[in-house]
Amino acid sequence: MLWVLFKESLFFAWQSLNSNKLRSFLSLLGITIGIFAIILVFTIVDGLESNIRGSIQSLGNNVVYIQKWPWDFGPDYPWWKYINRPVPKYYELDELQKRCKSTEAIAYRMGKRRTLKYKSNSIQNAVVAGISHDFYKIKNFDLTSGRYFTQNETDAGYHLALIGASIADGLFPNEDPIGKEIKISGHKAVVIGVIKKEGESLLGISFDYQVITPFNFARYFLDPNSENADPIIYAKARPNVSNAEMMGELTGIMRAIRKLKPLGEPNFALNETSLISKGFDGLFDIIGTAGWIIGGFSILVGGFGIANIMFVSVRERTNLIGIQKSLGAKNFFILVQFLGESVMLSTIGGFFGLLITYIITALGKDVIDMDISLTSTNIILGFTISILIGIISGFIPAYSASQLDPVEAIRSN
Amino acid sequence: MRPKIITFICVIGYLSVVFTFPQVFSPQIKKLGVFVPAIYGILVAANFIACVGLWYFKQWGVQLYVISIFAKLLFYILSNQMGFGFYFNIILSFIFILILLRFYPKMNQNL
């Protein structure tokens, strides 16, 4: 019985929409624009968020960065407190490795932009990093060809290099880079491996444009005491050891290495990736809220448009409602009939809104080279909003139609 | 004839729907889960339909109003959103329910 009622009301609704094509189109346009605006913003925000969170994830959740500057995204960054701090030193890495029990691996890295050359090919502003041997235990990267440095090679500072995929493409467009000699700021280095392509990252954290060399070789063209080389000591916690526990131990050891007074301010910063996540949380909330407000108003306007058109529709079909009621149609039938029309109208509008969003994100994905796609969550949300706006904006006209007196309704012009 | 106090409750109800409907697709609600916006949306729609029922002075309006209020409170408790608004909502809703129950016997029983 309910199915028959639903089918019939949908049939009536479809007939009504079909007989007033322009009016139906104009009224569903409001919903289309509203759904398009809000779902597009959510899709872009989700895409950006997943890209940035992926980049943060690649930094390691259980890795702590020992640096000069703390990661703080607040408006009042007290830079004057930190400016005279020393940068992390390579000898501090040795001390930390000897003393720290809670870490699985500790590594050092410094890096700066340098010019690379191979025969007539050159790349300017490539990031060249000097690392300690355990760097591979901290940072996850795969090699498409070649191998990583041996312990002896890193300790002795062999003139070797691992190059990123984009560097390999740029310097060696038609040949295998392994075994070839490149020049880094005039210093020769043999390529022993190529890092697998990682793709674009919004945080700019990608090995694609990097060259990795042993620290003792990198010292020829990078100054480890200079802040420009951005020296960092990475510490990765052992399994079952929390970051807080590891940071406690690292703080104690670093204070001892730097001979700080027990109550003195530390002259180093222990940074966690969770700090970056927190920094971005606020940004995503602002973008999401802005999209929500813009889309929300569009949808409200669309909803009023549908309500308006439904009142017109009821007015136009008052005679028909009277005839239907006099032939035995129940109030509920009339209610469902008009409500069905309203829901159908807004759902079609929502469908087109989602379709436009899908097309734009599919086109945009190729342009900006980032994974932005319409997720199932946003599709469900789009249809949910459409159906709800259809119910809310169509209920009053539908209910007023169902309450009409059959005799009065037939008499009306 | 609808009493003025019922009209007042309906106007408050309609306004609250206008302000709470955008929350259905707010980032805060979206974060709670895939189907949470849909559930919250159903509650908002039920609240609106209940207000229409009250406007027409129908008993089903009161019934739906009470159900939607309790369901909404349950939703806020389960989703751990119990700020100042939550307690204010409880007090206001219970006052409204008491007023509605007073007029309930006089209301129309039909759809």
Image (cartoon, rainbow, N blue to C red):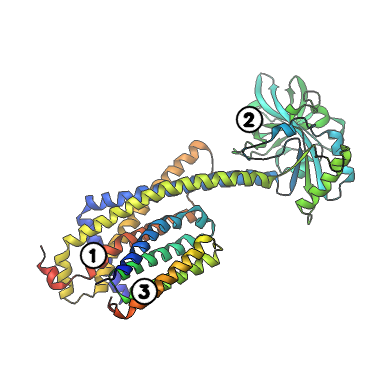
Q: Secondary structure at mark 2?
A: helix
Image quarter hosting the N terminus of chain A: bottom left
Q: Amino acid at mark 2?
A: Asp
Residue A242 vertical position relative to residue B63 in the rendered view, above or below = above
Q: Quadrant of residue A174?
A: top right
Residue assigned mark 3: B100
CB within 8 Å, label 2 to label 3? no
Rendered residue at 87%/43% (across/down): A262
**Label 2: chain letter:** A
Residue A12, label in figure: 1
- Horizontal relation, residue A197 to residue A258: left or right: left
Q: Quadrant of residue A158?
A: top right
Q: Amino acid at mark 3?
A: Leu
Rendered residue at 32%/49% (across/down): A30
Residue A220 vertical position relative to residue A336 in the rendered view, above or below = above
At label 1, counting other C-alpha atoms closer than 10 Å, the crowd grade (few under 14, some 14-19, many 20 or more) is some
Residue assigned mark 2: A169
Q: CA distance from mark 2 to mark 3?
A: 75 Å
Q: CA distance from mark 1 to mark 2?
A: 63 Å
Q: Secondary structure at mark 1?
A: helix
Residue A398, label in figure: none
* Residue occupying the far bottom of the picture: B105
